Amino acid sequence: MPTDVVIAQTTIDDEARAEELARGAVDARLAACAHVDALFTAVYRWKGEVVREREWRISYKTTRARLSELAAWVATAHAYEVPEWIVLPVEGGSDAYLAWVAEETAPVSPS
C-alpha cells in the first residue's frame, strides 16, 4: 500500500559536497534523513560523449508534501548543470518509521 513517504535521490562527484547536500536538507526539515552512499562509478552519455565518473548518491527520506520544496532546494544547491533527480515511492514500512519521517519534515510554526 502506497504511503506519503518517498525516497528522492541525486548524485554528485564530491564527497564533502554530498554530505553538505545531505545535511542541508535535513537541517531545513526538507528531509527526515539523508543517506550518502559509498563511492561508485557512473558511466553515462553527456553531450555526445560517454563519460566515466566517480560519484556519491544521496537518498532523501521525505514526504510528498515536502517533495517540491526539496527538489527546488537541491536544484539550487547542486553543482551539476543537470543533476539526477528521481523519486521512488515507499510502498510500505513500519508505522513508527513512517510517522517519524512525517514528524521530522513537518514545517515548524514560527513562535
Image: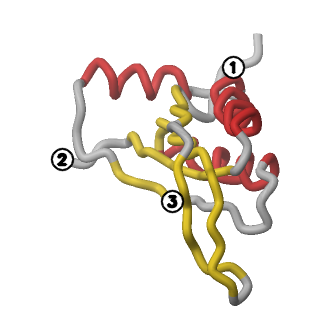
**How far apart are labels 2 and 1 at the CA level?**
31 Å
Q: Amino acid at mark 3?
A: Ile
The tag on residue 65 is: none
Nearest the viewer among 77 and 6 is: 77
Mark 1 falls on what kind of element? Answer: loop
How many numbered dots are placed on residues in this image?
A: 3
Q: Is residue 44 above or below residue 30?
A: below
Q: Amino acid at mark 2?
A: Met
Between discs 3 and 2, the one toward the N terminus = 2
Q: Which residue is mark 1?
A: 109
**How far apart are labels 1 and 3 at the CA level?**
29 Å
Q: Which residue is mark 2?
A: 1
Q: Nearer the viewer, mark 2 or mark 1?
A: 2
Mark 2 falls on what kind of element? Answer: loop
Question: Which residue is at 61% across, 61% downward?
Answer: 84
Quadrant assignment for the C terminus: top right
Q: Percent from the top left, x then y, of residue 105?
A: 55, 28
Nearest the viewer among 96 and 75 is: 75
Q: Check if mark 2's residue and mark 1's residue have beta carbons within 8 Å.
A: no
Q: Nearer the viewer, mark 1 or mark 3?
A: 3
Q: Is residue 36 above or below residue 104?
A: below
- Residue 98: quadrant of the picture: top left
Q: Nearer the viewer, mark 3 or mark 2?
A: 3
Q: Residues within 10 Å of mark 3 (few under 14, many from 20)?
A: few
- Residue 102: quadrant of the picture: top left
The tag on residue 86 is: 3
Question: Which residue is at 57% across, 33% downward?
Answer: 31
Q: Percent from the top left, x then y, of residue 89?
A: 35, 52
Q: Is residue 47 above or below residue 36?
A: below
Q: Amino acid at mark 1?
A: Ser
Mark 3 falls on what kind of element? Answer: strand
Between discs 1 and 3, the one toward the N terminus = 3
